[in-house]
Amino acid sequence: MTLLELEDVSVHYGRIQAIRNMSFTVNEGEVVSLIGANGAGKTTTMKTISGLLNPTSGKITFAGDDITKMKAHIRVVQGISQAPEGRGIFPGMTVMENLDMGTFGRKDRNGVPQDLERVFDLFPRLKEREKQYGGTMSGGEQQMLAIGRALMSNPKLLLLDEPSMGLAPQFIRQIFKIIKEINKQGTTVLMVEQNANQALAGAHRAFVLETGEITHSGTGKELMANPAIKEAYLGVG
Amino acid sequence: MSMVDGPTPLPEAAAEQAAEDREAKSTGPGTSVTPEKRGGRGIFGSLGERWNALPRQQQWAFLIVVVVLAYMLPLINPPIITTEPGNNFALACFDMARFALIAVGLNVVVGYAGLLDLGYVAFFAVGSYCAAMLTSPDSPFLHIPYLWTIPVAMAVTMFFGVVLGVPTLRLRGDYLAIVTLGFGEIVRILATIIPAMKGQVGFQNVGHPPGTEADGTPIFSNSNGVPWYWLTLTIIIVITLLVGNLERSRVGRAWIAIREDEDAAEIMGVPTFKYKVWAFAIGAAIGGMSGALFAGQVGFVNNQKFDVTTSILFLAAVVLGGAGNKVGAIVGGALVSYIPLRFTAIAEYKYLIFGIALVLIMIFRSQGLLPARQRLLAYGRTAYNKVAKKESSAIPGGEVPPAGRSGLGKGNGKGVQA
C-alpha cells in the first residue's frame, strides 16, 4: 500500500529551482533510498516531505491524505518523523530530554514507555549516556540520538537525512544495520544518502537524484548493477 | 490557541511549584549529572547543587527568610548596602524591583524562547502610557482607577506584542533583533509626534493606588517608595510563580526546544510560531505591567524615558543574571538598577561599566551569574521509570551495560539481532 506519494513536486529557493517535478512513492513497510551528490536536492526533498519547506507546485499525499499544505508540526502527529541532517539534536538538553522532546506531538501517552524501551534496545549507548548533554556527545552518538528521538513519536514514516554523514565506516555499517532493524519492526523508512553503497544495499527500492530530478529508479540491487551508477556513485568503473 | 492545551504541570512539578529557584539546577532521572557546559562551574554553580541537596523544609525556611528580608529591605536600610545619601533607599528599592520585573518579562522572550528582542522598552513605554493616559488629568481620555490600569496596560501591551510578533516572528536571529530595535524606536517617535501623546510635555499627576495616611497624604505618594516597592515585590512573586509554572509545562519545554533549535523543534511537533508569539505576548504583558507601575510611582510620563539604551540595559540585566533563569533575571535586574544608584560617583559611566561587566561575563561565565537549567522531562519521566523498573527486575542486581570501546558498543548487536 502506498504510504507516501509525491506528484510533480517542485521546490524553489527564491528563484532557484531545487527540485523539478519530482514524483515517487514509498510503500508501507519499505526502505527507500534517495541517493545523489551534493546539491542534488536530497535535503530539500526531505524538508519538503517533513514540511519545513513548501513546494511551489505539485502534491504530496501521506496515508491517503493530501498533506501538501500541512504544517510540519502537524505532519509529525500524522506520523512523519525526521532525523534531520547534521543530527539537529538539542545540544543543551540531555539525551533523555531530547528523547522526551520526540514525544511532544504525541496524543497517546501510554505508548511512550514502550517506544523508549525500543529506542534503548536499538541504541544501548543512549541508555548509558541518558544524562549526558546532547552537544557533548560524539557524532555517531548524536546520530543515534537523532534517530532515537525521531522514533519516540512512533512514526509511520521515518525520514533519515544522511544518517551516515561524518561517521567512521564501522559506525556507518552499524547505523545501516539498525535502520534495517527499525524497518523490520514495522516502520517505513525513507532516507537520503551520499553513501550509495550502503544505501542501495539496504534498500528495497532506490532513486538517483541529479540536480533536482530523479534520473534512475529501481530496486537497490538493480541500481547497484547499473554501470552508469556504478561509475558515478559506487566508485567502481 | 490555548496555552494549556498540553498536560497541565506534572504532579511532581506542581508540588515543587513553591521551591521556585530550584529550576536553575537539576533533578529528575535525566538531569542529575554535573552539567559540563552550563553551570556547574564556579561558586554559583555549586551553590545550585548544594541548594538541590537540601531537604524540602530547609529550602522552604530559607525561601521564607529571603522573602521576609526582601520585604523588610527598605525599612532596615542596611548601612553598607544603602544608596543614601545620594538616593532615597526606598525609591531605589522600588527601582530595583521595577527592573527585576522587567527582567523577568524579558527573560521569557530572550531567555526561554531565545528571541532576541532589542525593543523591549517599547512594551514598557506602552504600559507607562496606558497608565498615564487613563489616569492623568492632562489626558482627555476616559479615566479609570489606577489599579485598573495595570490589567489594561497588560492587555494592551499583549495586543501590541501579538501585533508586532505575528509579522516579525517569521524572521529569525539578527533580523528579528533589528525589527524589534526598530519597533522600540517607532513607539518612542510616535509618542513624540502624535499630539494626543503630548511628546516631551507628557502627562503629570498619573494616578496611584487608593488609600491615605492619617494626615491625608496618599499612601502611594511619589516620594514614598516603600508601598510601591511592596506592591511591585508582591507582583514579582506572583509573576515568578506563574512563569515558573509555565516553564515547567509543555509551553516551557516548547520554548526551550525553540531556543535550542527551531527547525528541530518544529519537526518534533512543536507549533513553533504559535509558541513564539505566546512568549512575545507574555513578555510584553509583563513589561507593560512594569511600565504602568513606573508611571504610577514617578507620576509623570513623557517621551524621554524610553530610548534604545534603556532597552539594552534591560537586555544586559537578563544576560548578566543568566538568560533562561528567572531568579537570575531578578538578580540581574536588581543589580543593573542598584549599581548606578549606590555608586553615584560612577553612575555617569554606567554604560561603560556594564559594557565591561558584560564582556567579562561573556568570557568567563557566558551563562550569566545564575545559569539556566530547566527540568524538561514530561512523559519521559514516567516512561523512564517504567523501563528502569522492568530492566532491574529482569536482570538481578541490575546489569551495567558493556562499555563499548568502538563507538556503538557491543550492546547494539543485541538490538540488531533481536
Image (cartoon, rainbow, N blue to C red):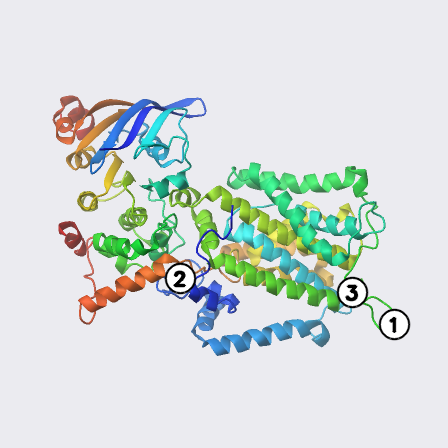
Measure the alpha-carbon separation of dots 2 and 1. Answer: 57 Å
* Crowding at mark 1 (Cα within 10 Å: few <14, some 14-19, many 20+): few
Q: Who is closer to the viewer here, B77 or A219? A: A219
Instruction: Residue at 45% x, 50% y: name it.
Output: B254
Labels 2 and 1: the sequence-earlier one:
2
Q: Nearer the viewer, mark 2 or mark 3?
A: 3
Q: Residue B345: x percent and y percent?
A: 73, 62
Q: CA distance from mark 2 to mark 3?
A: 46 Å
Quarter of the image that includes the N terminus of chain A: top left
Find the distance from the CA under tag 3 to the CA under tag 1: 13 Å
Q: Are marks 2 and 1 on the same chain?
A: yes
Residue B187 or residue B316, whichever sits in front: B187
Q: Which residue is mark 2?
A: B35
* Chain containing mark 2: B
Q: Is residue B146 left or right of residue A78?
A: right
Disc with the residue nearer the chain's start (3 vs 1): 1
- The residue shown at (40%, 40%) is A74
Label 3 residue SS: loop
| Residue at the (48%, 63%) spot, across then down | B24
- Please determine if labels 2 and 3 lie on a single subunit: yes
Amino acid at dot 2? Pro
Disc 1 on helix, strand or loop? loop
Residue occupied by mark 3: B220
Residue under label 1: B215
Which one is nearer the viewer's eye here, A21 or B356? A21
The residue marked by circle 1 belongs to what chain?
Answer: B
Percent position (x, y) of residue B220?
A: 78, 65
- Mark 1 is on which residue type? Asp
Q: Chain of mark 3?
A: B
Picture quadrant where residue B377 is located: bottom left
